[in-house]
């Protein structure tokens, strides 16, 4: 019994050791260990591989940034001149407030090497006032301003500009002539019909008729002829952008 116990104990130890060596857990640890050793060995053999990977990533980011379009902006300040020529006649006789009109840009709008709007670009305006006048209100008057402009790239932007106004000449002299003629005709008719007293009555009646006619009729129309050069100014800054 005493001679065989150490042998059995030794066999048992050997079995336990073999079981530990060939168990799945040990195999996984061994494989993991080999993989780690392989990775470390690979990095040791190629020390620049990690650095090259980082360099490539940085290069890709830079290339993406270079491909992205750059936005260039320019702001035309308040007071910038916008010079145009009208495409058609605008008149208090034929137009109404709120109607639009077109004009062509007389001078290109340029910022350094960027032509924001070419010469000949279409500008659209609006008639803000159009009063034929001639009655109690007074002489006729007309006012216009620009509201949009076509840019070089084809876009149309809204703009805010000053107004340009025109007023007709006063018609007081003509009105007085109309009243005087009416009074003279009335006096002549009254004199024929009733002598001196009739002449006075006729003059008063004729003068009143002439005054009524002067007040009832419109004054001289005011107009802006076609091809008129108009100089507007921006009343608000205009910011436009483009991709480069």
Image: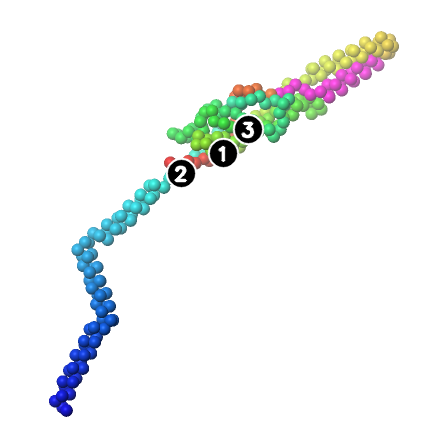
Q: Residues within 10 Å of mark 1 (few under 14, many from 20)?
A: some
Q: Residue at x 50, y 27 (%)?
A: 122
N-terminal-most mark, 2 or 3: 2
Q: Which residue is mark 2?
A: 71
Does the magenta segment cover residue 201? yes
Q: Residue at x 80, y 12 (%)?
A: 186
Q: Which residue is mark 1?
A: 157
The image position of residue 210, as x and y in percent, is: 76, 16
N-terminal-most mark, 2 or 1: 2
The image position of residue 113, as x and y in percent, is: 38, 29
Disc 1 is placed on an element classified as strand
Q: Residues within 10 Å of mark 3 (few under 14, many from 20)?
A: many
Asked where in the image residue 69 lies, by quadrant, the reply is: top left
Q: Is residue 134 visible?
A: yes
N-terminal-most mark, 3 or 1: 3
Up-down relation of residue 143 to residue 34 (above or below): above
> Of 200 and 46, which appears nearest the observer?
46
The image position of residue 102, as x and y in percent, is: 54, 26
Q: Which residue is mark 3?
A: 125
| Quadrant in which the N terminus appears | bottom left
Q: Magenta region, mostly helix, strand or loop?
A: helix
Up-down relation of residue 111 to residue 179 (above or below): below
* Magenta residues, start to end: 199-222
């Amino acid at each position: 019994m005493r001679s065989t116990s150490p042998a059995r104990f030794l066999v048992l130890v050997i079995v336990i050791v073999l079981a530990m060596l060939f168990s799945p857990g040990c195999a996984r640890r061994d494989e993991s260990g080999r993989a780690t050793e392989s990775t470390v060995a690979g990095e040791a053999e190629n020390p620049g591989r990690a650095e090259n990977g980082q360099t490539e990533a940085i290069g890709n980011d830079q290339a993406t940034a270079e491909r992205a379009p750059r936005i260039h902006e320019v702001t035309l300040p308040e007071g910038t001149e916008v010079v145009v020529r009208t495409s058609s006649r605008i008149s208090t006789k034929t137009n109404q407030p709120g109607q639009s009109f077109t004009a062509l840009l007389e001078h290109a709008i340029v910022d350094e090497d960027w032509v924001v709007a070419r010469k000949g670009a279409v500008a659209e305006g609006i008639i803000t006032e159009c009063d034929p006048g001639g009655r109690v209100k007074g002489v006729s008057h007309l006012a216009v301003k620009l509201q949009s402009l076509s840019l070089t790239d084809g876009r149309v932007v809204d703009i805010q500009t000053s107004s340009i106004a025109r007023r007709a000449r006063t018609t007081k002299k003509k009105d007085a002539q109309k009243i005087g003629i009416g009074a003279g005709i009335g006096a002549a008719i009254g004199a024929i019909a009733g002598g001196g007293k009739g002449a006075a009555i006729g003059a008063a009646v004729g003068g009143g008729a002439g005054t009524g006619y002067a007040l009832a009729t419109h004054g001289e129309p005011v107009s802006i002829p076609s091809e008129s050069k108009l100089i507007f100014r921006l009343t608000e800054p205009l910011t436009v952008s483009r991709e480069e």
